[in-house]
Image (cartoon, rainbow, N blue to C red):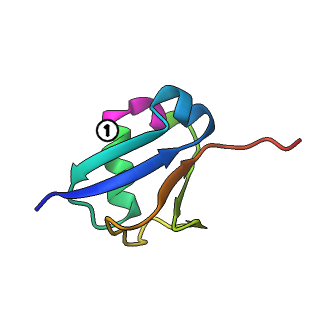
Amino acid sequence: METHYRITFYGILQERIASELSLNISLKNVSEMRCYLEENYPFLRNIPYLVAVNKTISPPENPIRPSDDIALLPPFSGG
């Protein structure tokens, strides 16, 4: 069964993909989402990025639900 996820991108990721992306697939966790994104956007394999779920940096095994606030965060430099 496919499910709708909304992902927000920031920084260089926003420039290369979009500010938001809607996925209509079935995902169990952050790791599955990363694999899907890196398969469809290969440049992500070469950019270190973090995944935040509901505004908390999440490990690969963290489950995700369609209602979650999901964001991809590129490396940031201070200022």
Q: Is residue 57 left or right of residue 61?
A: right
Q: Residue at x 59, y 41 (%)?
A: 10
Horizontal and vertical percent position of residue 52: 54, 61
Q: Name the magenta segment's main secondary structure.
A: helix
Which residue does the numbered mark 1 point to in the structure image?
39
**Which residue occupies the extreme right position in the image?**
79
- Quarter of the picture holding the C terminus: top right
**Which residue occupies the extreme left position in the image?**
1
Q: Residue at x 48, y 47 (%)?
A: 8
Q: Is residue 38 left or right of residue 27?
A: right
Mark 1, other Cα within 10 Å: few <14 / some 14–19 / many ≥20? few
Amino acid at circle 1? Glu
Element assignment for label 1: helix
In the rendered structure, does residue 42 fall within the stretch colored magenta?
yes
Horizontal and vertical percent position of residue 13: 54, 35
- Number of numbered labels in the structure image: 1
Placement of 34 over or under 19, stated as above or below:
below
In the rendered structure, does residue 65 fall within the stretch colored magenta?
no
Horizontal and vertical percent position of residue 66: 31, 64
Placement of 47 over or under 36, stated as above or below:
above
Q: Residue at x 52, y 68 (%)?
A: 54
- Quarter of the picture holding the N terminus: bottom left
Q: Residue at x 79, y 41 (%)?
A: 77
Q: Start and end of the magenta stretch? A: 40-45
Q: Nearer the viewer, residue 58 or 11?
A: 11
Q: Quadrant of residue 11?
A: top right
Horizontal and vertical percent position of residue 9: 52, 43
**Which residue occupies the extreme top position in the image?**
16
